[in-house]
Image (cartoon, grey):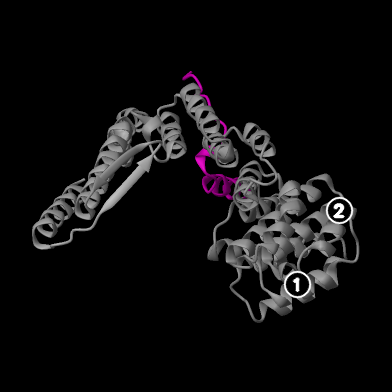
Amino acid sequence: MKTSILLLLALAAGALIAQFLLQDAGYVLISFHGYRIEFSVPMMIFLLALAYLLIRLVLRIVQAPKKLGEAAGRVRQRRANKHFTRGLIEMAEGNWARGERMLTRGIRNSETPVLNYLAAARAAQNQGQHGRRDRWLEMAREQSPDSTGAVLLAQAGFQIDEQQYGEALKTLAKLPGDQGRPGQALDLKTLIYRQTGDWGSLKELLPALRRRGRKNAALASLEQQVFSGLLQQAAGKKDLAMLDSLWKEMPGHLRSDPSILRAYFSGLIAGGRHGLEARLRKAVKAGWDARLIELYGQLETPAAARIKRVEAWLLIRSEDPELLKTAGLLCMQEKLWGKARSYLESSVGIHPDPATYQLYGQLLEQLGESVGAAEAFRHGLGLVSPAGLPALEKLPRG
């Protein structure tokens, strides 16, 4: 507007100066339906400039309500953004109720209403207000149908926080194909299956997790957990076919993992599989593990041959308590009472253990030393955590 006024004044001044300075100011004639209008060129310029100014003025007047509305909208938007920022700060400080109020104040004027609703849902969740949480989520979805995927993922996350794993899986199943963000949904499903111990479902996710290119320590740990859990389940059912299938299916690097080997051989032994001595001995040679040594003592092969193998290992690991206990067990099976006693006493002397004391007590009972056996059993019970023992009632005094 200021520019137009300055332009008009300049043109008017120029026209007047030209009127006085030029001998021939020019001549303009307009004839229209019998009407004639005559004026000089400077005056024509002046009138055109005046007409331009009037048109601009009329347009400004016509557009004024719209401009005022836009200006007011910008003010409301700045205020809403300020409330959003303040709400996030309140949430960061743990003021969930105040944060929720700030986030939802003037929310319709916010530049990012969906983010307001999602943050408000988190604030309601942390207050235990699940009904209000779900209402904010529904309003976010209504506000922006394109945000359905993000809203469902947020809802599933809230349900996981509440350990509502079944409900969370149902929510994830609603994800639209083009908005499902399979990466994040995959992470949430992985979390759910790990928390619930659903190793079968988690195994089905492993190919997708590998395709994401995350071949790192976390994925290796997850694979180990999955196959270890499945092997333990198969061992509990004494399902030898499942054990063999899992062994063939698992990645090669897991076949030397101690926990995998323990679960696998434990299941095979429980299921009655024969001919394991060579395989188990090879596994022990590849990676020494106390639990594998214990399993070696549980094999069905004659104890005499295994005693020789264990005593050969003792030449290298003479102070290994688990190896000494296994040697004692095998000697008891062969009724070599003296050697069994020596091995078991050495074992508990190096590392007192309830199971070893239990075995030692059985040996002493076999030898007729009831007092010593009772003492061994008492020592073994003393090593058991009180939480694992039943409560004992006090006997009434006689």
Residue 188 in view, yes or no: yes
Q: Which residue is located at x 62 percent, y 76 percent?
A: 318
The alpha-carbon separation of the residues under discs 1 and 2 comes to: 20 Å
Q: Is residue 147 magenta?
A: no
Q: Position of residue 92 (x, y in %)?
A: 32, 42
Q: Which mark is residue 235?
A: none
Quadrant assignment, res 127: top left
Q: Residue at x 49, y 19 (%)?
A: 396
The answer to which of marks 1 and 2 sits earlier in the sequence is 2
Which residue position holds label 1?
283
Write the residue at 76% across / 71% down.
252
Which residues fall within the magenta stretch? Answer: 373-398
Mark 1 or 2: in front is: 2
Q: Nearer the viewer, residue 86 or 146?
A: 146
Give the number of the disc on residue 242. 2
Q: Position of residue 301 (x, y in %)?
A: 88, 65
Q: Foreground residue, 75 or 110?
A: 75
| Figure quadrant of residue 23 | bottom left
Q: Answer few, some or many: residues within 10 Å of disc 2's Cα (few below 14, many 20 plus, some between 14 and 19).
A: some
